[in-house]
Every structure is written in C-alpha cells, then in structure tokens.
Amino acid sequence: MGGILFGTESFGYSVSYLDSQANSSQYFLGAEGYLAFLNKPETKTIVDMFEQFSVPSTLSGAPTLVDPEDVIVSLNEWDDSSLLYLIASSLELSWTLKNPTEKAQLLPKFIANIEADYDLIIIDCAPTESILTTAAYRSSRYVFVPVKPEFLATIGLPLLARSFSEFMLRHQDRKIEIAGIIFNDMRRSNTPPEQVMSCREVEAIAEDHGWPVFKNPAHHSDSYAAGSRAGTPIFSTSYARDYVVGEFQKVAEEFLKVVGLK
C-alpha cells in the first residue's frame, strides 16, 4: 500500500520508503547506484529518522533530531523541470520493528516539517502490517493499493480492510481514505483465467468496502525490470515500446487526478 501527501509551494516530488527490502529505493537509484549510495559514510536513510531517539552510545552522546537535508536525496530534474527527491530505505529498517515503541509518531512529525516544500509525497510500504503501516496511515491523506491479480491478493485485501478499519476506529480525527486499487503486472493479451477470476474477486471486495478501482491497469512489461537495473523510469528506458509508455502514462494521469494534481 502507499500513502501520499501533497503541498503547494514547489514543483518537487518526494518518495519515502518504508519497506525493509528497499526494492523501490533500488529501482530509483539503479542496482549499482544503490550499493554505492549505501557505501557512503555520510549516507542516512529512513532508518535514521525512526531511530533518532534510540538509546545513545558513549560515542554519539545525546540523541539529536535528524536534519531532513541529511536524509532527502535529490535524484534528477525531468524534462518538464519537475524535481524528484528520495528518502531511501535499507535492510536495517527491520531492526526498527524489533523495538517499535512510540516510533509511529516520528514519521508524521517529520513530514509535517517538510510537506510545504513538495507538491507530492509518496510513501511506499511493505505488504505486511507493522508499526511502519501505522506510521504511514498517520502520515497520509490517501491510500493506494497496488494489487497483482492472483489468489494471494484476494486473501490479503480483507486483512487490509481490517487493518484500515481498526486504525480509523482508533484515530477518528484522521482524514484518510483508500482512494484506489491499481491492478499491477496484468497480462495485456491472452489473460490467464486465474488473473481474470482474481480481478473479479478483488473488484467484488472493493465494491463491498466502497473502494474505487482504477480503470487503467499497469500491464506487465520487461522494460520495468530493465529500468530497475538502470535506475531510469520506464518512459526513458531503451527499447520501451510506445504503447507501454502510454499505458503507464494513463495510470499516472488517473492517479494525479484522484489526488487533485491534474
């Protein structure tokens, strides 16, 4: 699932990752770029934000607030002059889950200090519920759920519904909604019966809960994997077919319309 907030004072887009596997961080930085990033002594990730009040050592002294400039990395300027920034994740995020006490409040406080500088902040989450999920809920206005049409997705959605409902009961002052389910990795043609059946089941669950489903799915494309290695978006990947780029563009436009940026 992913949550987003958007500000109005710049043309910047920020992406923050709450997945300890850091797959999305690796995509944006590229395979080699991500390893090089982690090997820099000065590198800080989302882990440092969650652990800024951990017990200090004799070397570190008293805990200090993390400076946003130390964890936000500028990635690139696109052709339309918009800017993309990243708060990367790392495997060490799994240590945060071993001592989660009062850490969920740190992310919304951090975002509150920077949100006015960005038009859009996207939080990419792991598929399993944890303190990180709560942190994302507390930081977000909208929740979007990418779903791969398979049997496991049908099992997982009711768990998401329960998680979201419990959060809303505990935080009735929060303004947050599930704004869309996005089918991901769909077969473009000769769709397997399992995908067809799973889509119908997901749509039925979504209708029961009043969740919208995106009209445009993200179809399977080998160019996505190629972009992951190179650290480039699919529309800049070599040999990406025009219709593939167009399909992803439609998903993006639908997303931006939902959040009021188009």
Image (tube, helix red, strand yellow):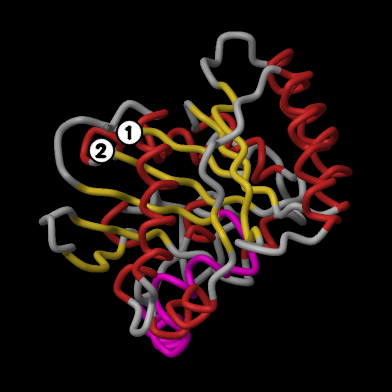
- The amino acid beneath tag 1 is Phe
**Residue 151 image offset from top left, x and y in percent:** 88, 52
Query: Which of 7 and 217 lies nearest the eye of the viewer?
Result: 217
Instruction: Find the magenta span and give its range.
Output: 18-42
Residue 38 lies in the magenta-colored region: yes
Pointer 1 local density, CA inside 10 Å: few below 14, some 14–19, many at least 20? many
Residue 156 position (above or below residue 90): above
- For the C terminus, give its image quadrant: top left
Viewer-nearest residue: 96 or 161: 161
Q: Amino acid at mark 2?
A: Asp
Residues at circles 1 and 2 in contact by the CB criterion of under 8 Å: yes
Instruction: First in sequence, mark 1 or 2: give its number.
Output: 1
Q: Which residue is mark 1?
A: 6
Image point 43% across, 34% down: which residue?
109
Element type where label 2 sits in the image: loop
Which residue is drawn at the image coordinates 63% and 61% (left, top)? 185
Is 50 left, or right, of 187 in this rendering?
A: left
Q: Which of the labelled discs sits on residue 248, or is there none?
A: none
Residue 119, numbered label: 2
Q: Is residue 106 left or right of residue 149?
A: left
